[in-house]
């Protein structure tokens, strides 16, 4: 199982330090075997020691240079970061990243051997058009993405389920994950309003290899409970 926490634009460096210390202590004490990834804001990048993997929520496809407001590989290397989230719906729909830009980023970090957690997911209006429209839309988010890249993790996150408390039915998650499984052998995460109380039934589904969690991951104790659930699958 993979359990990943996406802090988004939350937490300071000091808050992140406390969180990482607590989660790392849990991982060591419980001898956790699952892969635990935390994506803090880039201002909180640091060396957090053994246990969880620190990832970047975003990075620009450069080593360094004149790209105001962005971070590149040099800034990731300083903290030994080799995991990057690409294609998150907030970057697609709020920050306006196009599939073309996302694919450039994907291929850049792929060529450097980074672990890539690649996010896809539809808006509610697409889901309401039915299964074939939904799958056709998902296919547009996979254009120019190497689905057999060895360090790939795919996260299916319906936009309408992110931060809303709404979650697709287990049947709906199963169907999408079965479709994705036909396209890739790599780990498949579900994301969108995952919390302690609904995680058990989600991770029990075939073709769900873990979760990507936003809001419910922000409390270390909560996140550790989710790690416990993953360990028991
Ligand atoms: P959420 O966010 O768990 O708060 O719905 C998930 C995500 O955006 O990765």
Image (tube, rainbow, N blue to C red):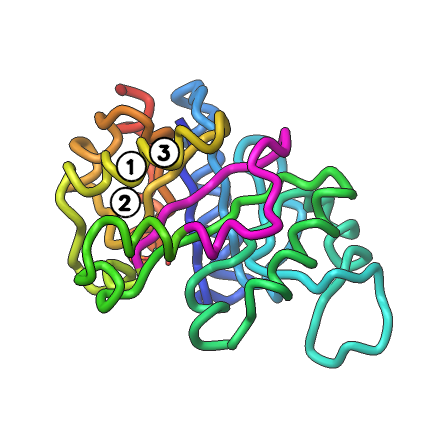
Of the pair 224 and 17, the residue shown nearer to us: 224
Image quadrant containing the N terminus: top left
| 36 falls in the magenta region | no
CB atoms of marks 1 and 2 within 8 Å: yes
Q: Residue 226 carries which label?
A: 1
Which of the four quarters of the rendered structure image does ligand 1 lie in? bottom left
Residue 199, x across and y down, in percent? 21, 38
Q: Residue 210 carries which label?
A: 3
Residue 86, x across and y down, in percent? 56, 55
Of the pair 231 and 222, the residue shown nearer to us: 231
Of the pair 131 and 52, the residue shown nearer to us: 131
Q: Which mark is residue 222?
A: 2
Q: Distance between the residues labelled 3 and 1?
A: 10 Å
* Residue numbers of the magenta segment: 139-158
Residue at the location (52% across, 58% down)?
Answer: 87
Image quadrant containing the C terminus: top left
Q: Is mark 3 on a helix, strand or loop?
A: strand
CB atoms of marks 3 and 1 within 8 Å: no
Q: How far apart are marks 1 and 2 (CA)?
A: 6 Å
Q: What element carries label 2?
A: helix
Q: Quick check: 39 left or right of 132? A: right
Residue at the location (74% across, 52% down)?
Answer: 108
| 144 falls in the magenta region | yes
Residue 57, x across and y down, in percent? 55, 58
Q: What element carries label 1?
A: helix
- Quarter of the figure with residue 42: bottom right
Q: Does the residue labelled 1 lie within 8 Å of ligand 1?
A: no
The nearer-to-camera label among 2 and 3 is 3
Rendered position, 96 above or below 104:
below
């Amino acid at each position: 199982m993979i359990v990943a926490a996406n802090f988004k634009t939350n937490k300071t460096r000091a808050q992140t330090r406390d969180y990482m210390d607590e989660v790392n202590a849990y991982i060591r004490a419980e001898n956790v075997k699952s892969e635990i990834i935390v994506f803090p804001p880039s201002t909180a990048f640091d060396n957090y020691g053994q246990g969880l993997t620190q990832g970047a929520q975003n990075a620009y496809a450069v080593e360094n240079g004149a790209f105001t407001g962005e971070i590149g590989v040099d800034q990731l290397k300083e903290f030994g970061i080799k995991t990057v989230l690409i294609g998150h719906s907030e970057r697609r729909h709020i920050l306006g990243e196009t599939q073309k830009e996302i694919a450039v980023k994907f291929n850049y970090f792929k060529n450097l051997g980074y672990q890539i957690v690649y996010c896809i997911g539809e808006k509610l209006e697409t889901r309401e058009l039915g299964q074939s429209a939904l799958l056709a839309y998902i296919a547009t988010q996979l254009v120019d993405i190497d689905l057999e890249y060895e360090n790939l993790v795919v996260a299916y996150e319906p936009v309408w389920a992110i931060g809303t408390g709404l979650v697709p039915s287990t049947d709906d998650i199963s169907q999408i994950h079965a479709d994705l499984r036909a396209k890739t052998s790599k780990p498949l995460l579900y994301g969108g309003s995952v919390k302690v109380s609904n995680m058990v039934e989600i991770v029990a589904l075939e073709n769900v290899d873990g979760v990507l969690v936003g809001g419910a991951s922000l409390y270390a104790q909560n996140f550790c409970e989710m790690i416990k659930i993953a360990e028991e699958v």
